[in-house]
Image (spheres, rainbow, N blue to C red):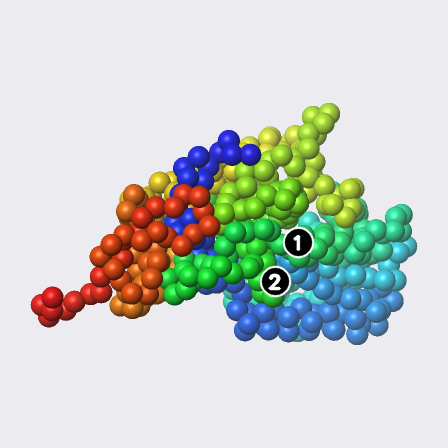
């Protein structure tokens, strides 16, 4: 590792903390809110209860549950021109002998018969979509039991327009992702940038947050993908990498670097390592690409990359390559811009991750900086001009050594308090 991100890895520790905190605060703006989640859960439970109460034998005891981003807590609110996808499995325990058409016909007929769901329902290649008037829609994939192997999670045969049924195990993938999230990285110092302005103590990486590093890293990757794809000059935007593929590659890369025993200087370094390693887990043999569901090898998330019609597969594969190059380039640009001042850094971050969430993060960080300056806790790294915590709560005119476990220590000059109305 280390072949990419030359400038990003050279950043001062305080700057790495600052970049990561901007991303973290920006993602807070893009998380599904409690009210969003409540509405979504109420909506899909309502659909599930309705279908399970229908008298048709194929629908008896049916169960509906979330898969994908909502299940793995990696949801990112869509860009303003898009609706949020809520991916659901409709498991039919009594449909083992039913054909795809039998299943689709009965689910379609009962959804269309409902006075609310009927006008909102449309067909998809794998099931149905209920378009609510708002910022989300429900994508429902009917499925039956997978009888061939005993696998973790809930292996399924899901309906598919091209193949009748396809193997899938979203719950197994989600459980594996949860397991990976519980494996915590070794990071020298866990304080955020703003926390470092208020304290000088070393803290262990906490393990009680709902959002672990892998959750956040995956959200960063997905948000960057969305903004990249929305660029009007991007010819690959319509072929952007699907979320489950990115999530799986991030999970595999995360496990590789965390299980290596490496001690990271910051979470930013962890993010860089994960992004750098993601392409390594794309398999290619016999002119076929594979990114397997780790809980079900038959499920290939890169399946569409192998399609020959209208060069669809080649475009999808090339879109991943172009997105990854853009991610490397953007993080390098963020690193370079951070050495030119905070305004330049925020502008670069806005280009890569969207103006609205980055602007909100900027306001919160600048408020913390202002408060710390007023308390005499703010300093500037003499060699780079980077803002960091002063070594002491009492400002001094003499340079102090920054409190950091990084080997790249440099003199820190405390910033004096603001003096208004001509006070000296």
Q: Quadrant of residue 315?
A: top right
Residue 26 x/y as whole percent: 44, 58
| Other residues around mark 2 within 10 Å, as few (<14) / some (14–19) / many (≥20) | few
Residue 131 x/y as whole percent: 59, 63
Q: Of label 1 and label 2, which has the lower sequence position?
A: 1
Q: CA distance from mark 1 to mark 2?
A: 9 Å
Residue at coordinates 22% horizontally, 61% vertically from top-left? Answer: 416
Residue 127 showing in the rendered view: no
Residue at coordinates 65% horizontally, 37% vertically from top-left? Answer: 281
Residue 183, numbered circle: 1
Residue 207, numbered circle: 2
Residue 394 x/y as whole percent: 29, 65
Residue at coordinates 11% horizontally, 66% vertically from top-left? Answer: 424
Most distant residue in the top direction? 286
Residue sitting nearer the eye, 114 or 37: 37
| Other residues around mark 1 within 10 Å, as few (<14) / some (14–19) / many (≥20) | some
């Amino acid at each position: 590792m280390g072949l990419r991100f030359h400038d990003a890895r050279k950043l001062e520790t305080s700057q790495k903390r600052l970049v990561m905190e901007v991303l973290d605060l920006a993602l807070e703006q893009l998380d599904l809110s409690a009210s969003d989640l409540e509405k979504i859960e109420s909506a899909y439970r309502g659909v599930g209860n309705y279908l399970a109460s229908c008298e048709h034998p194929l629908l008896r005891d049916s169960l509906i549950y979330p898969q994908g981003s909502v299940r793995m807590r990696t949801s990112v609110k869509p860009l303003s021109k898009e609706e949020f996808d809520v991916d659901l499995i409709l498991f039919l325990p009594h449909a083992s002998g039913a054909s795809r058409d039998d299943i689709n016909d009965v689910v379609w007929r009962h959804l269309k018969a409902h006075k609310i769901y009927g006008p909102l329902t449309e067909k998809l290649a794998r099931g149905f979509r209920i378009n609510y008037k708002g910022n989300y829609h429900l994508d429902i994939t009917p499925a039956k039991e997978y009888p061939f192997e005993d696998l973790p999670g809930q292996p399924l045969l899901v309906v598919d327009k091209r193949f009748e049924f396809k193997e899938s195990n979203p719950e197994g993938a989600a459980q594996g992702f949860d397991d990976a999230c519980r494996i915590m990285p070794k990071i020298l110092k866990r304080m955020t940038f703003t926390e470092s302005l208020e304290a000088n103590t070393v803290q262990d990486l906490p393990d009680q947050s709902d959002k672990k590093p892998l959750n956040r890293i995956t959200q960063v990757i997905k948000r960057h993908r969305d903004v990249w794809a929305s660029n009007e000059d991007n010819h690959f935007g319509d072929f952007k990498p699907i979320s489950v593929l990115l999530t799986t590659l991030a999970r595999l890369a995360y496990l590789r670097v965390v299980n290596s025993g490496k001690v990271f200087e910051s979470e930013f370094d962890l993010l860089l390592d994960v992004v750098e390693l993601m392409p390594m887990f794309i398999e290619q043999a016999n002119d076929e690409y594979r990114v397997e569901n780790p809980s079900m090898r038959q499920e290939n998330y890169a399946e569409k990359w192998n399609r020959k019609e209208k060069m669809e597969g080649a475009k999808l594969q090339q879109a991943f390559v172009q997105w990854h190059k853009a991610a490397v380039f953007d993080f390098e640009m963020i690193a370079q811009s951070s050495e030119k001042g905070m305004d330049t850094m925020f502008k670069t971050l806005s280009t890569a991750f969207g103006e609205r969430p980055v602007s909100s993060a900027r306001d919160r960080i600048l408020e913390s900086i202002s408060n710390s300056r007023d308390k005499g806790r703010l300093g500037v790294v003499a060699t780079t001009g980077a803002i960091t915590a002063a070594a002491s709560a009492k400002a001094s005119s003499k340079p102090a050594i920054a409190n950091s476990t990084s080997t790249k220590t440099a003199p820190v000059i405390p910033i004096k308090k603001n003096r208004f109305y001509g006070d000296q």
